[in-house]
Image (spheres, rainbow, N blue to C red):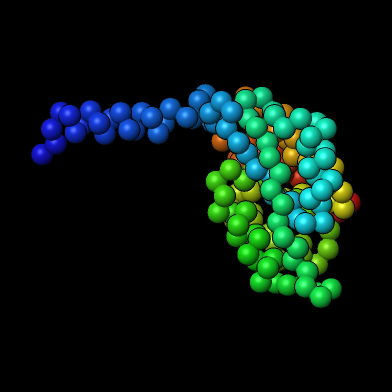
Amino acid sequence: MRTWPGLLAALACASLALGGCGDDGAAENAVVSVYVSAYLCDSAKRELAKEGARVGKLRVRVRCLPSAERGGRLDLAALGAGARKVTEDSTAVAYAENAGAANRFVPPIVESAGIAITYTSAGELAISRVLHAMRRAEGSGDPPREAVAEEMDGLFDDNG
């Protein structure tokens, strides 16, 4: 049998947990992450600094993954570990990878978590694409990950 103080404490905890989810699916100053492959990292960070690391009430950060190449060859274990890291981060809204052999292995892992993927040879373009999708999705009421994935779906299918 629950007591009033116990019930009130449970309700207070629940309201605090739900309080961060405003009308637009994320709290003010919430951080969202864009994961990028090592090859795109430096240029993606420069572009984010140039364009601004904020879209509406969200702060955007670039998270760089370690290289998935060892000795000039693709390291599938490192590639899989990077993709899993992306899916395990609740702040992840997109993954940017340079066009290449890795494109066969990453999508099943990342897309299973509903995270948008963009392929390009330029980190600047990757960040511009994600920020564009975030601006278009602003105010949709959907959680950031879902909103970005929906906005990017089919828009950026090129490999360059």
| Residue 155 versus residue 132 in the image, above or below | below
Q: How many marks?
A: 0
Q: Position of residue 64 (x, y in %)?
A: 72, 52
Image position of 101 (left or right of 149): right
| Residue 105 versus residue 124 in the image, above or below | below
At 80% from the left and 31% from the top, the residue drawn is: 51
| Residue 132 versus residue 38 in the image, above or below | above
The answer to which quarter of the image holds residue 134 is: top right
* Residue 143 in sight in this render: yes
At 65% from the left and 32% from the top, the residue drawn is: 59
Image position of 85 (left or right of 47): left
Q: Position of residue 112 (x, y in %)?
A: 59, 56
* Residue 116 in sight in this render: no
Image position of 79 (left or right of 69): left
Q: Nearer the viewer, residue 58 or 114?
A: 58
Q: Position of residue 26 (x, y in %)?
A: 54, 31
At 50% from the left and 25% from the top, the residue drawn is: 22
Q: Position of residue 113 (x, y in %)?
A: 58, 52
Image position of 67 (left or right of 109): right
Placement of the N terminus among the 4 image quadrants: top left
At 57% from the left and 49% from the top, the residue drawn is: 89
Q: Nearer the viewer, residue 51 or 102?
A: 51
| Residue 85 versus residue 131 in the image, above or below | below
